[in-house]
Image (spheres, helix red, strand yellow):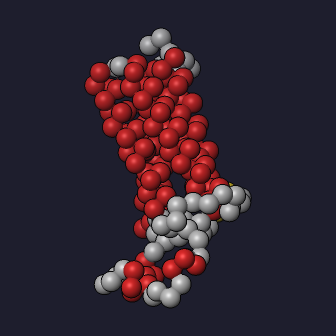
Amino acid sequence: MKLTRSTLVTIATAGSGALLLGALGFQLAGYAPCKMCLWQRWPHALALVIGAAYFATKSRLLCWLGALAAASTSAIGAFHAGVEQKWWEGPTSCTGAGDALSGLAGSDLLPGSATSGIVMCDAIVWDLFGVTMAGWNFLFAGALAVIWVLAALRKA
């Protein structure tokens, strides 16, 4: 079976949709997303829009933009996985022990909010075969980026 550009775009677009649905499924199952998890969702949403725009225009440029969106979320996933593994530091707004805020209570920082709702970006809340959700996003989104590139390189 020869994979046409449209077939590849369909696969890549559906892949981003599936990853978004999976993320929402985990959220509904009680795994609240951290700030970096949410960052990873935006490029997938953009890839869905790009996929729809491709079918309206058949523009090869949109395949390259789809590849960029998928590569972006893959890169964010790689960074986030590294933060979770403590290979490097993440954003101070959602990582660390909060030592710099000693002497302040959570209610001082977030008046009117429950501090238990904060999800730390450096905490691993789920993994499969030692790979976290961010790690899986890195791997799958990287594969989607390759599919978008293959679509862009196809003649038709």
Query: Residue at image x 47%, y 33%?
Result: 68
What is the number of callouts on the image?
0
Residue 5: x and y in percent read: 46, 20
In-front residue for pair 137/81:
81
Vertical relation: 59 (above or below) 125: above
Vertical relation: 47 (above or below) 4: below
For the N terminus, which image quadrant? top right
Please identify the quarter of the rendering in which residue 106 is found.
bottom left
Query: Residue at image x 51%, y 17%?
Result: 153
Residue 139: x and y in percent read: 62, 44
In-front residue for pair 116/45:
116
Query: Residue at image x 58%, y 78%?
Result: 99
Residue 100: x and y in percent read: 54, 77
- Considering every residue shown, the one lying at the far top of the view is 155
In-front residue for pair 154/110:
110
Residue 69: x and y in percent read: 45, 37
In-front residue for pair 39/51:
39
Query: Residue at image x 68%, y 62%?
Result: 86
Asked whether the viewer can see residue 127, the reply is yes
Residue 66 located left or right of residue 140 = left
Vertical relation: 155 (above or below) 67: above
Vertical relation: 114 (above or below) 11: below
Residue 58 located left or right of residue 94 = left
